[in-house]
Image (cartoon, helix red, strand yellow):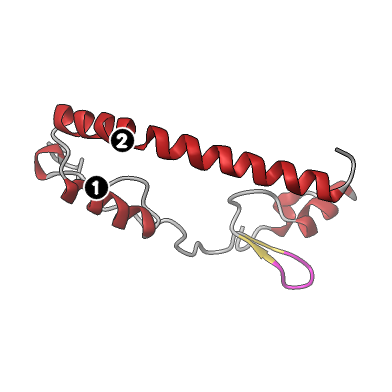
Amino acid sequence: MNNLVDIQSQIQKLQKQAAEIKAREFDATLRDILVKMDAFGITVKDLQAASVSKRKGRGRPARAVSDAPKGPGKGAKKKSAGAPVAPKFKGPNGETWSGRGLTPRWLATLIAQGQVKESFAIGG
């Protein structure tokens, strides 16, 4: 199996085998899914909601009202992820860094040259 034709032939055989296995196991898999849906009380609507939320970038469906956090302060709104943060450091060429995440290259280079990070702090 050293040439392209041999490899492509092997790929076709494997794809045919995969299709046969899928067709053979489809009904059993479907029954297994239905049994689990029944056991956990999952509806088609739940699956659709999970599918929609996953397409929006959320990994799981929203919490039900009964699952909501209880007590004061537990449901407080948090800042949204990715919201801009004021810069805390400014480089000699106008570069800025919020102080969060990895140290930017411009600052890492200056530190490697013996300078102190705090000397680039804004307003401090």
Q: Residue 103: percent from the left, percent from the top?
A: 70, 50
Q: Nearer the viewer, residue 43 or 79?
A: 43
Q: Residue at x 36, y 37 (%)?
A: 26
Helix, strand or loop for disc 1: helix
Q: Residue at x 19, y 47 (%)?
A: 46
Depth check: give the residue in front, 96 or 27.
27
Considering the whole magenta stretch, tell me its main secondary structure. loop
Residue 31 on image: x %, y %: 25, 32
Residue type of the residue flagged with mark 2? Asp
Q: Is residue 94 magenta-colored?
A: yes
Query: In the rendering, which numbered label is found on residue 11?
Result: none
Q: Position of residue 37 (x, y in %)?
A: 19, 34
- Which is nearer the eye, 73 or 16? 16
Relative image position of residue 107 (x, y in whole percent): 77, 55
Task: Say the numbered circle drawn on residue 47.
Answer: 1
- To which residue does mark 2 refer? 27
Whether residue 9 is in magenta: the answer is no
Please report whichever mark, 1 or 2, sits nearer to the chain's N-terminal start.
Answer: 2
Task: Give the answer, above or below, for where 65 lies relative to 109.
Answer: above
The answer to whether one can see residue 115 in this image is no
Label 2 packing within 10 angstroms: few (<14), some (14-19), many (20+): few
Q: How many numbered markers are drawn?
A: 2
